Image (tube, rainbow, N blue to C red):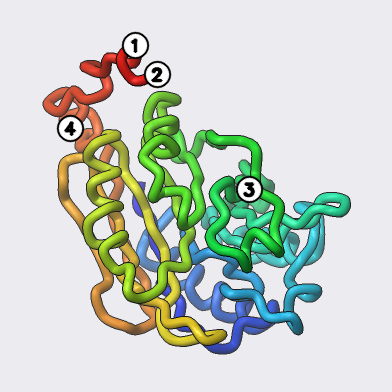
Amino acid sequence: MRIACLQAACGATGVQQFLERLRTAARRAADEGAELLVTPEVSIGGYPLQAGNLAEASGPVDGPQCAEVSAIAREFGIAIVHGWPETDGPDVYNSARLVAPRGETLAVYRKAHLYGRAERTLFTPGAEAVVQASFGGMTLGMLICYDVEFPEAVRAHALAGTDLLLVPTGLMRPWEVVARTLVPARAFESQLYIAYANWTGDHGGLSFCGHTTVAAPNGTTYAITEDREDLLVVDIDPMVLKRARASTTYLRDRRPELYA
């Protein structure tokens, strides 16, 4: 399965501006043969959210924001992962949604590990550790940004059979080590692929470091190392998964009775 990860430049992050950029990225990804496009954390609205666009970007799963993304997925026949502030009654979640090429929702994940005071003030933490969907003959799972920095969260996906872990992110400087070192280590130690799509540039007083990465279970890493908006296109190979899991048997050799 071929996937594309959008490394998006900060700047105009209103809903309509993002949808225009998403349409351009989806067209390019589809032209390059990708079946799935992954976008950064809170891609609808931008990260960090500003007071002026929170109301515009927020909505339920069946709201107009998600409907617009579904329309783009249908237009180009490509699955899309997008982030947005999901509303559910009085609660607001930092959520990611996997949309099928025909526009239907395959999965919604709510960020469980909220980062910093600002996120904990704005969002309710998600309560579901493993969210999965079947697509392209593989089992896809989702985490969001800070979640992937917890080995327990990734290992839970590995034990549940996730093949490709999709991680919209908003990684800031000076934490490039997360993309360069930690994400590849998580993929290797849990024997799955990780697709990690980040912002780049300055926004809201924060500096995002890019380094959008796809890490394979055999230690191979693909990344955008320049600070620019771009698309990282990578083939996810089931045979790489099979061979890596056969030769690096961390999951089989675990002794969970010792870890309680």
- From the image, tell me which residue sits under label 2: 260
Type of amino acid under label 2: Ala
Identify the residue shown where x is 80% and y is 73%.
Answer: 55
In the image, residue 169 sits, relative to residue 157, either above or below, namely: below
Residue 190, position as x, y percentages in the image: 29, 34
Label whose residue precedes the other's in the sequence (4 or 3): 3
Contact between labelled residues 1 and 2, with CB atoms less than 8 Å apart: yes
The disc label shown at residue 257, or none: 1
Identify the residue shown where x is 41% and y is 49%.
Answer: 148
Identify the residue shown where x is 65% and y is 75%.
Answer: 49
Residue 53 visible in image: yes
- From the image, tell me which residue sits under label 3: 110
Contact between labelled residues 3 and 4, with CB atoms less than 8 Å apart: no
Q: CA distance from mark 4 to mark 3?
A: 30 Å
Image quarter for residue 94? Answer: bottom right
Type of amino acid under label 3: Arg
The disc label shown at residue 4, or none: none
